[in-house]
Amino acid sequence: MKSLKKDTKEKPVKKGKMSAQGDITVSYSEKLKSSEYEKHINKLGIELVKLQEWVKQKKLKVVVVFEGRDAAGKGGVIKTIEQFMNPRICKVVALGVPTEKEKQQWYFQRYVSELPSAGEMMLFDRSWYNRAGVEHVMGFCTKDEYEEFLRSCPEFEKMLIRAGIILIKYWFSVSNKEQEKRFQERIENPIKRWKISPMDIESRSKWVEFSHAKDNMFAYTDTKQSPWYVVEADDKKRARLNCISHLLSLIPYKDLTPKSFKLTARRTDEHYVRPPKQEQNIVPQKY
């Protein structure tokens, strides 16, 4: 396949060590304390609520794509954003394996149905970029399907932007060593074990292949109109703070949140009699 030159634009200088596989790892002098993290994340949470009201009242259509290696921290930042926002406005899209019918459709078709209406913000926990990553590396698509995706994806995203959708794409970068550590934590913790699948284990042996796939994907789809933003994710807390702070900086907004108000006095009714508790199925108080 002929290589295409990607759009030339200035990239921020990244500090850190380059691994043999091309991933940049950033070292920090010390871990962020939980108290510091909570202070910062609560401030950002207030700003997310302001953004939410702006999106709702201005009827914006926002799509945020989260991609990266397994255990890179995509799910964590999505949950963090989600906890502050109204689920009717901010929705998470995490599609499973395509059905036989979906496999016969235009590749982007099932993702189009998940795009936001006016006043909505959709967080894609993985997206149409599955084809450029896991499907290509693990052999779930043909070479022709892969090459067609790389050609058509930039055009597809241009259509979304022309249609008024604000498209933001994040790539979470994690080092080999840190991914291994997180996998081990998931295996040892029964609460987290569901997060690791046989596919995750199998893909571990293809670290270099995934690195090449990511580089090729960026070469085609990291454009001026729809750039990729790389989040250094070896430190989960810092990654969440940095990503959310950056997201807020990309969408200009004003504070339209409702003002504080006082509750009116509750009206009482002397004639109302509550039914006996014995007639209700009360949940046992075990704790």
Image (tube, helix red, strand yellow):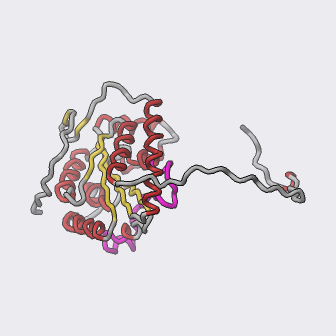
Corner quadrant of residue 32:
top left
- Quarter of the image that includes the C terminus: top right
Q: Is residue 240 left or right of residue 141?
A: right
Image: magenta residue range: 80-109
Q: What is the x, y in percent for residue 214?
A: 23, 51
The one of 242 and 25 positioned closer to us in this rendering: 242
The one of 36 and 18 positioned closer to us in this rendering: 36
Note whether residue 200 is visible.
Answer: yes
Q: Is residue 217 left or right of residue 249?
A: left
- Quarter of the image that includes the N terminus: bottom left
> Magenta span has 81?
yes
The residue at 38%/61% (across/down) is: 62
The residue at 47%/43% (across/down) is: 193
Q: What is the x, y in percent for residue 74?
A: 38, 47
Q: What is the x, y in percent for residue 169?
A: 30, 54
> Magenta span has 231?
no
Q: What is the x, y in percent for residue 277?
A: 85, 52
Q: How many marks?
A: 0
The residue at 47%/57% (across/down) is: 53
Compared to 22, does 134 lie above or below? below
Note whether residue 196 is visible.
Answer: no
The residue at 18%/39% (across/down) is: 13
Corner quadrant of residue 33:
top left
